[in-house]
Image (tube, rainbow, N blue to C red):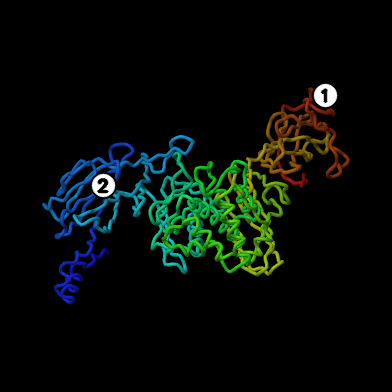
Amino acid sequence: MRRRRPVAAVALLVLLAAGAALLAAPAAAQEVDVDHTVGVADEPGRVDVTTVVDAPSDAAGLTVVLPRRTDVYETEGFARVDERKYEWTRSTDRPRLSYTMAGNVTVDRGAGERYTFVVTDEWAIVRSPRVAAFDRAGRLQTDQHRTVVGEGVAGPNITYLGPAEVRTRDVEGVDQRLRLVVPAAAEMRADPERALASMADAARRLPFGDPDGEVFVVAAPTTVEWAATGLQRGGADMWVRDSQRVDSPRNAWVHEYVHTRQAYEPTEATRWTIEGMADYYAALYTYEAGRIDHETFRRKLERGDRQTHADVRLAAPDTWDDEANYEKGALVYGALDRRLRATSDASMGRIVAEFGGDEMRQADLLEAVEAAGGADLRADAERYTETTATPPAWDREAHAEAFGGPVFVRSVEGYAVDGPYRSGPLAAPRLVAGERLETTVTVRNEGPDPGEYAVEFAVDGDRVETRRGRLAPGESATLSFTRGFDAPGEYELRAGGTTATVVVEPPADPRVTAVSAAPGTAAPGERVELRATVVSTADRPAAGPVEFTVDGETVAGTRVTVAGETTVTATTTFEAPGGYTVRAGDGTASVRVTVREEASTSPTAAGGAGNGDADSGGDGAVTTGTDATGAAPGPVAVLVALTATLLWRRR
């Protein structure tokens, strides 16, 4: 519920109490309520806005100034003064303006025009409308509110139009709520809850800036060409591409959040700190949360020493090349932060907090660094910002010494597979659909202090499981995560800060390499065991049907799964004397069975070897007990038993 402040009543009481001497004092500043309704316009690339002003009855010469690139098509209670300025006519207490406003905004940062705000056929991310109000005494305070027509969500500075899911999180220990808008068109790389958790962690840890009551965040669908990975606008509104991860040293969710807490006003010489510190804290907090390892964190900082930045002087923006303020800025800010932490009870964050909302000049920044860390550190800060000198990144031991606390090192020790085809270790995460992958992760505390660890296991950005525990310095723990993969494709696996690609393929086709029959010469009606040796046609497990045929007629069949080699057996009888060709699989391998005219007088040893070997040329070895004229036209096949024995062989 909105409340209008009783400014006039308070002023009257003060005047009565103080006497007529105050009658000549100027009236108290008025606050004007403004309501905006935002929807999609018929004209492509624009939005439709209706702005209603709750005009104070005693306002003298109330005028409003509209945003740039607007086109007014209807007014009530306002008269046009110029292209953007309209004056209240006093014909109504709630005058309004209806207009369209540019929704598409682009910038060119060297790769052509890219969007910072956009209107598509299905959704839009646009600047929230805002007007300025004046009376004859000057600018008036305004309390502006926004609603959307149809589906969507409006923040103070960014508005999303279209279907979406909204998630919120109240930050523990901080009087702040995070509101995340996930459009229906968005395909978030990070689980929304993990994105919220990442920002909440930054909200609790940042030592500067007063947190706004609410941070408004939109996950921007990556179906257009955006000019950046994220953008922060106004006090605490921002959008971040849906493709951005939380386990990256350039965690855009944290980077943009940091901007919401930067209250100071930079000069040209200190402007590098805006992006430099945001990139630094994004990497630092992601590392200390266990989402990346120290090597990844260090490589991120080392980008500040790239050859492309060799001529960059941070205090001189005209020397910056692409991303110099991000990359070299992060390295310089981080190096100063580490040295402050290592040598004193101070940090760069605390120095930034001292400036509050004031201007941060280069001289003031250097003086603050000297006051906290001494003359030598000031000299280095001056050298790293005003010359092309660059500090080195630091190793894990130096980090632990400066930042204290536990230092958890996570590594993937190996993979194993389990499923219908095989079970055992894998050199690489390559599976067949239907198998389960087990990933083994070791976490070690290489820091000076005990602490709680958290190891996340995620597939394609979706968290599968998180394991937590506590380790003393020097202790380690071994964790196993298991995930089944039912569909072929490539999956991104993240475990303990390590990323790997899991390749899942369909099973190969089985191939019969040999067929045998025992006995190879049988009496009419005598049971004959047929045996087929089956392997995969590729370098992965196989699955598929294997059938036995006698002279082209199927007598038995089963579905086979095989990783190395397996044997399939079946039992049949032949009622008529003659010679028969037994095949299995694609028919390439075969064996001949001869049936005598009279019953056998001597028993055949169970499991005896057959007379025929696999033959890729046709009939294989043939024995005949009678001439061809005595052969029956075909067998009478009776399937007695069908078994498959899987013989495992590791490759």
Q: Amino acid at mark 1?
A: Asp
Location of the C terminus (image quadrant)? top right
Nearer to the camera, 577 or 348: 348
Q: Amino acid at mark 2?
A: Leu
Residue that sits furthest to the top in the current view: 629
Q: Is residue 460 visible?
A: yes
Which residue is labeled 1 in the image? 627
Q: What residue is shown at x 24% (from left), y 53% (from top)?
A: 133
Secondary structure found at label 2: loop
Provide residue 450's location: percent of width, then percent of height. Answer: 65, 70
Mark found first going from the N terminus, 2 or 1 = 2
Neighbours of disc 1 within 10 Å: few (<14), some (14-19), many (20+)? few
Dot 2 alpha-carbon crowd within 10 angstroms: few under 14, some 14 to 19, many 20 or more: many
- Disc 2 from disc 1: Cα separation: 106 Å
Give the x, y percent position of residue 488: 60, 42
Q: Nearer the viewer, residue 262 or 460?
A: 262
Q: Which residue is mark 2?
A: 66
Question: Nearer the observer, disc 2 or disc 1?
Answer: 2
Pointer 2 with pointer 1, Cβ within 8 A:
no
Q: Position of residue 346 (x, y in %)?
A: 56, 66
**Location of residue 16 (image quadrant):** bottom left
